[in-house]
Image (cartoon, helix red, strand yellow):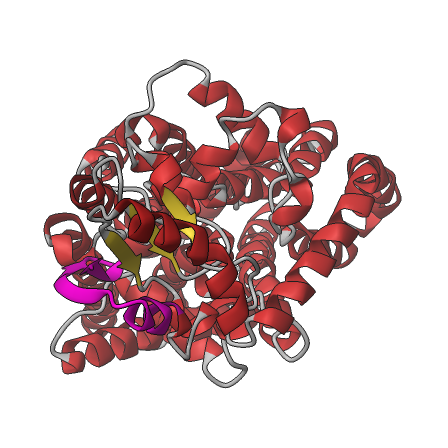
Amino acid sequence: MLPIILIALLLRLISLNQSFWLDEAAQATISRHSLTAINWAADFQPPLFYVMTLFWQGIGLNAEWFLRLPSVIFSILTIYFLFRLVDQLALKNKNASHMAREAMRTEFKKQNLYELAAYANRLIQDARFSSTLLLATSPFHLYFSQEYRMYSFFTFLTTLSWYFLYNKKLANYAIVLALALYTHYFAVLIIIAQALWMLLYRPKIVQRYLIVLAIAISPFLLWLPILGQQINTARDLITIWPKWSAVAGVGFWKFPGLLLAKFTVGMTSPEPKIIYALAVMIVGAIFLYSLVQIVLSIKYKVLRVSSFIKISHHTKYFILHTDKKIMIFGFWFFIPTILAWFSSLWISANSPHRLLFVLPAFYGIIGMGLDNSIMLNLIQHLKKIPKQVRDDKKNLSKNISLILFILLLSSNIYFSGLYLFNHKFHREDWRSATRYTDQKIGEKGIALSESNNLWAPMDWYSARPNRYIGASTEMNISEESVRQKLSPFLVSCNVLHTTCIVVLYSYLSDLSDPSHLVEQNLLKNNYKLIEERDFRGVGIIKVFDK
């Protein structure tokens, strides 16, 4: 496990100091205020991560790499607890697991089935290795491990909640679930998945689980009035900016393919597109292959083994119970994903990054599926064909799983490297954009956003944030709202006969000012475009002078 942790940590420390993008800068600027000064209704998120970052920023070190360290740590903890969860999938406790495995190995050896006996001892170890290594190198997980937002923390809480639920540590589970609800609203999807899993696989303790669940949910009831205000704010935003729904969510038919694409390549957009498409198809095929192997193994394992081996109760329980527990990953991945997918018919909140918390289950299915393909092959062919042919089939099955694993690992490494070492795929470069703007506007010029307020990165990075303003008096930009906001500045420049540089940011102008009313106002006031600069992710910055 330690080598995987070290690999994951090393990858996550590379390029950690890149510029904040819009959402990260918003996180940082909001967390500079006291809890009572924060307008919680203005952001569609629960408060816990803001509380955590408030104290983290209170240390006084505001470098990007330092502020992102909690996300790195939570991502490492996610990998660790995925490892622990896969390690415990055999049985309810280690002693019973050890007893069952030893019973199976003994029975197999008595009947000279050495290959299956040896593999039984490595089954869980191989699955935990493949699942965690794939998560450690995942370009999607890596990207959000370096994000100063709640996604890495929420993914950790999700993984931890499944770990505690499986181990029947319901008190710990309740605490983690309460934290998850105050971290991200998609915790509701986790609750639905876990409740269904408990009903099917832990019916004897469902009543106790429901009591614990009620206790975990009850603190969140205090937040419901604020949630109602946030919903109204979101509705108002979509009313003013109709195209915002396309930014916040993904269309119904586009969602499955885009989610798989992001799981494959992360937040990069590789060229040529044929590489992109080929990688996505390969990863999708491997996932389906793994899923099929798990389904088939449930059908064949007990039936085929018991048909030609006198099998003990412990051994039968070990084989069957392993497959039932594998269904944790099925519930964890499919139920939240399907619910988020169909919810897109009513609300726009299903962007792939919000589904980061199902990624550990995605790799859990692949890891367990590839291992099950080897076990399934052995069971189906034992004592039915000569040993030499049986050995050949066993080796072929191992080779297929190994090839598929190497393909997936290679894809992860390639796209993670593409993100880490190619600045083209880094976050929006607001740090450079505001440095450039500060130099241009000096003490007398102004920088404009095509909105009613400055963007959060301007406030965070600029040495002159008071020289950055929204170009409109209201979010719904009109000629009158622009004239009212800019007239005082433009008139003062005319009266004083001074040179007043105006820097105009086109960031999100397709949403806020599709008719380019701000630029038209500047041109009507005899301002001339003298320079343009393009900054990664921020877009075109235009410099005007009169």
In reply to whether residue 541 is colored magenta, the answer given is: yes
Residue at the limit of the structure toward the bottom, as seen here: 253
Q: Is residue 364 left or right of residue 285?
A: right
Q: What residue is rendered at 64% in x and 69% in y?
A: 339
Looking at this view, is 267 or 167 the one in front?
267
In reply to whether residue 8 is colored magenta, the answer given is: no
Where does residue 380 sit, x and y in percent of width and height? 40, 73
**Range of residues picked out in magenta:** 518-546
Q: Is residue 379 visible?
A: yes
Where does residue 370 sit, x and y in percent of width and height? 34, 63
Where does residue 188 sit, x and y in percent of width and height? 70, 53
Looking at this view, is 325 or 376 the one in front?
325
Question: In this rendering, is residue 32 above or below 362?
Answer: above
Looking at the figure, which quarter contains the N terminus?
top left
Looking at the figure, which quarter contains the C terminus?
bottom left
Q: Is residue 430 left or right of residue 347?
A: left
Quadrant of the rendered image containing residue 47: top right
Q: Is residue 194 left or right of residue 320?
A: right
Quadrant of the rendered image containing residue 502: bottom left
Q: What residue is rendered at 30% in x and 49% in y?
A: 493
Q: Is residue 178 left or right of residue 110?
A: right
Where does residue 110 sit, x and y in percent of width and height? 40, 49
Question: In this rendering, is residue 306 above or below 176?
Answer: below
Looking at this view, is 30 or 140 the one in front?
30
Q: What residue is rendered at 30% in x and 65% in y?
A: 264
